[in-house]
């Protein structure tokens, strides 16, 4: 049997594409290995994503008690002063701090209920033969005429047939903090720059807090064993953690968070979506919004069998990357306190130019 369409990879992009395709009657085969039910970093959902979730019919998922509205964000960026940004002043409304694992599980359940045929496995081999794709997993071989690549930064399909670009080497060290007290900590998000990179803290709806440190992977990093102590040493983050009695409650994880993209984001028999198409610096808060937008745009073009719409999607990805690179340089350019720091000096260079998507 040759399936009309297969979606490779889980996460938000894969789930959204599988859901949209299934509701359009395409019954996609969805190949994605279920990961351990552990905390997944990347929880700040922009308010711009809410209309996309409404289009997908999934906005009710945000009402779960495991998520919270992000009314207050504070940043020490460009100076030591902590500057507040209140969501009441944002026209789109407040962002949402997600329980990422719970959100993706709920979106996955919707996709399967709609008719997506899930195969709980990773693709180990991929080949093109007789005009269709042959996908090998531990469950056997699956054949499909068209692929949605939602395999994240590794871009299992797209990286083989298009050029990959990267603007930086940003990486993240992430750790969860918990507290024994019964008083709920103030629900805030904090961003604090320093000479080596920058810190991020977000209070989760369940009373825990996630703390991330970002710097380039080829530069000296904080030792994992010292990450909690370093967080407490930061003026803003440390004061918040100490005030509410937080202590680290899990291992330090290291994840790739660099800016990378594929051009073009489409090819003969495939399309890249989510981080496989373009992955952005977490400072932008664009990751999950881009995942939803790309899944909806590409799936809609496929359902309509509209080649021009698919080409427009690829061009929009390329333009979005260029706009992002310009905005990234402007935001990092506001921090000028450490001109001799390699991390900051790199981000004060001329903006990279993203190649435009080419026609198929």
Image (cartoon, helix red, strand yellow):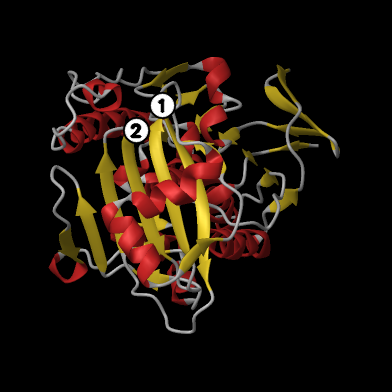
Residue named by callout 1 = 261
Q: Which residue is mark 2?
A: 317
User: Could you tell me which quadrant the N terminus lies in?
Assistant: top right
Does the CB distance between marks 1 and 2 fall below 8 Å?
yes
Dot 1, crowdedness within 10 Å: few (<14), some or many (≥20)?
A: many
Coordinates of residue 187 in the picture (x, y in percent): 35, 72
Determine the residue positioned at 33% across, 49% down.
285
- Position of residue 12 relative to residue 204, above or below, is above
Query: In the current view of this chain or complex, which residue is farthest to the bottom?
Result: 182
User: In front of the other: label 1 or label 2?
Assistant: 1
Name the spot of residue 112 as percent of width and height, x first: 67, 60
- In the displayed structure image, the side of residue 139 where residue 158 appears, left or right: left
x then y, percent, for residue 82: 17, 57
| Residue positioned 15% across, 34% down in the render | 337
Between residue 146 and residue 283, name the one nearer to us.
283
Q: Residue drawn 72% across and 45% down?
A: 33
State the SS at label 2: helix
**Toward the viewer: 284 or 83?**
83
Q: Position of residue 273 (x, y in %)?
A: 48, 38
């Amino acid at each position: 049997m040759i399936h009309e369409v297969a979606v490779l990879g889980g996460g938000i992009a894969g789930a959204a594409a599988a859901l949209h395709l299934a509701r359009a009657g395409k019954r996609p085969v969805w190949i994605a290995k279920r990961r351990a039910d552990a905390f997944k970093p990347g929880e700040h959902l922009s308010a711009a994503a809410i209309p996309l979730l409404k289009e997908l019919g999934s906005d009710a998922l945000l009402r779960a008690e495991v998520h919270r509205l992000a009314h207050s964000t504070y940043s020490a960026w460009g100076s030591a002063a902590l500057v507040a940004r209140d969501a009441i002043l944002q026209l789109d409304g407040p962002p949402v701090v997600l329980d990422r694992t719970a959100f993706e599980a709920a979106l996955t359940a919707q996709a399967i209920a709609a008719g997506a045929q899930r195969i709980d496995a990773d693709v180990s081999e991929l080949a093109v033969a007789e005009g269709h794709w042959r996908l090998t997993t531990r469950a056997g071989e699956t054949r499909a005429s068209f692929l949605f690549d939602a395999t994240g930064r590794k871009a299992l399909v797209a990286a083989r047939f298009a050029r990959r670009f990267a603007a930086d080497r940003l990486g993240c060290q992430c750790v969860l903090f918990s507290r024994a007290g019964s008083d709920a900590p103030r629900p805030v998000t904090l961003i604090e720059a320093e000479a080596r990179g920058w810190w991020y803290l977000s209070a989760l709806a369940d009373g825990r807090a996630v703390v991330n440190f970002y710097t380039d992977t080829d530069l000296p990093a904080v030792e994992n064993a010292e990450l909690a102590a370093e967080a407490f040493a930061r003026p803003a983050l440390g004061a918040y953690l100490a005030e509410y009695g937080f202590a680290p409650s899990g291992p330090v994880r290291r994840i790739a968070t660099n800016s990378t993209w594929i051009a073009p984001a489409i090819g003969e028999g495939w399309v890249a979506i989510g981080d496989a198409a373009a992955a952005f610096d977490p400072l932008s808060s664009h990751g999950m919004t881009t995942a939803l937008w790309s899944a909806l745009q590409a799936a809609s073009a496929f359902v309509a069998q509209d080649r021009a719409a698919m080409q427009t999607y690829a061009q929009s990805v390329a333009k979005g990357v260029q706009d992002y690179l310009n905005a990234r340089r402007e935001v990092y350019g506001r921090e000028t306190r450490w001109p001799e720091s390699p991390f900051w000096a790199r981000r004060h260079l001329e903006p990279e130019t993203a190649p435009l998507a080419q026609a198929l």
